[in-house]
């Protein structure tokens, strides 16, 4: 009886500690937890205060319990400073994702929809608030491809709508919103280590905001199928992102 109670206690603690899972990764990905390094593998649980780092030609996709999806690009670092998903009392739910280095993409889940003021993204140069959206960026620019976001840097706040981006830096205020071009998207998805596949039957490269977005969705679908059929070993998936 004592053994059963102990096992239930341990399982309960594991369930509480886990806030999401690695659903895909490519290359060399490391999780630092309580001063210990853990190699990434498919379906590995992630926890609050984890620091996830990638190296050259690597990336990792994490799906959190509220269905938020974070993609960490190559040569990048993410620290999960805060994550609480309270299904019974949505007012308690909150996130704080700190992107210390490199490139990221965020697809909003339940927390961002029910409690957007407490869904926060942070880089070295900016603080980002969301309104049910898809956001991507690095330490020099922030873009929005769906919904809208608020970016604050150097005491200046800028609202970005879908199809816009801004420049950010450590030594000056952010720029005014600019039209999100195919060239900027191409740069960001390259840094995320996501291949933009053709969205047409003739195999030509996607160009333009809508075409690239559609092509990325196609790549994601193929990646999910690939990961679903993999064995989940340490070699990772074939890369990709959401």
Image (cartoon, rainbow, N blue to C red):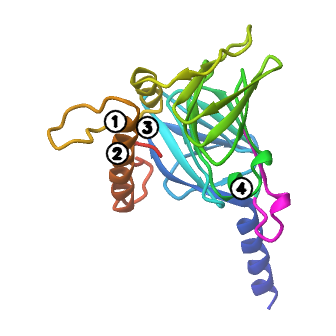
Please give the residue where the numbered disc 1 appears in the rendered image. 196
Q: Position of residue 36 (x, y in %)?
A: 69, 43
Q: Do the residues labelled 2 and 1 touch (CB within 8 Å)?
A: yes
Q: Which residue is disc 4 drawn over?
A: 111
Q: Give the image location of residue 160, x and y in percent.
A: 63, 31
Residue 157 place in picture, x, y as percent:
77, 25
Q: Where is residue 155 in the image (x, y as percent from the top left)?
A: 83, 19
**What distance separates the C-alpha of mark 4 from that of mark 1?**
29 Å
Which residue is labeled 3 in the image? 27
Q: Name the residue under label 2.
A: 219
Q: Quadrant of the N terminus?
A: bottom right
> Within 10 Å of the Cα at label 3, are there few (<14), some (14-19), or many (20+) other Cα atoms?
many
**What mark, if any, has residue 105 been given in the picture?**
none
Q: Which of 222 and 81 is in front in this view?
A: 222
> Which SS class for mark 2?
helix
Q: Which of marks 4 and 2 is nearer the N terminus?
A: 4
User: What is the secondary structure assignment of the residue under circle 1?
Assistant: loop
Q: What is the CA distance from the residue labelled 2 to the residue labelled 1?
A: 7 Å
* Residue nearest the viewer, comparing 199 with 60: 199
Range covered by the magenta-colored residues:
85-97
Q: Residue 16 appears in which quarter of the rendering?
A: bottom right
Q: Is mark 4 on a helix, strand or loop?
A: helix
Label 2 Cα crowd, 10 Å radius (few <14 / some 14-19 / many 20+): many
Q: Which residue is drawn at 80% across and 63% down?
A: 90
Dot 4 or dot 1, earlier in sequence: 4
Residue 196 in view here: yes
């Amino acid at each position: 009886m004592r053994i059963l109670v102990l096992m239930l206690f341990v399982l309960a603690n594991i369930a509480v500690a886990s806030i999401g899972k690695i659903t895909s990764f490519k290359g060399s990905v490391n999780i630092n937890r309580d001063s210990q390094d853990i190699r990434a593998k498919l379906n590995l649980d992630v926890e609050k205060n984890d620091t996830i780092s990638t190296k050259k030609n690597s990336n990792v996709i994490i799906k959190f319990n509220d269905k938020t999806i974070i993609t960490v690009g190559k040569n990048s670092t993410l620290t999960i400073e805060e994550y609480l998903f309270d299904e019974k009392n949505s007012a308690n739910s909150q996130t704080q994702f700190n992107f210390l280095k490199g490139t990221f993409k965020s697809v909003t889940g339940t927390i961002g929809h029910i409690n957007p003021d407490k869904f926060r993204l942070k880089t070295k140069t900016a603080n980002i608030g969301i309104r049910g959206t898809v956001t991507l960026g690095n330490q020099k620019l922030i873009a929005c491809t769906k919904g809208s976001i608020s970016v604050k840097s150097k005491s200046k706040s800028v609202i970005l709508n879908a199809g816009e981006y801004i420049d950010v830096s450590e030594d000056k205020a952010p720029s005014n919103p600019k039209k999100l071009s195919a060239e900027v998207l191409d740069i960001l998805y390259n840094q995320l280590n996501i291949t933009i596949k053709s969205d047409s039957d003739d195999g030509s490269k996607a160009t333009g905001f809508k075409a690239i977005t559609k092509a990325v969705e196609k790549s994601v679908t193929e990646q999910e199928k690939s990961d679903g059929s993999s064995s989940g070993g340490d070699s990772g998936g074939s890369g990709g992102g959401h």
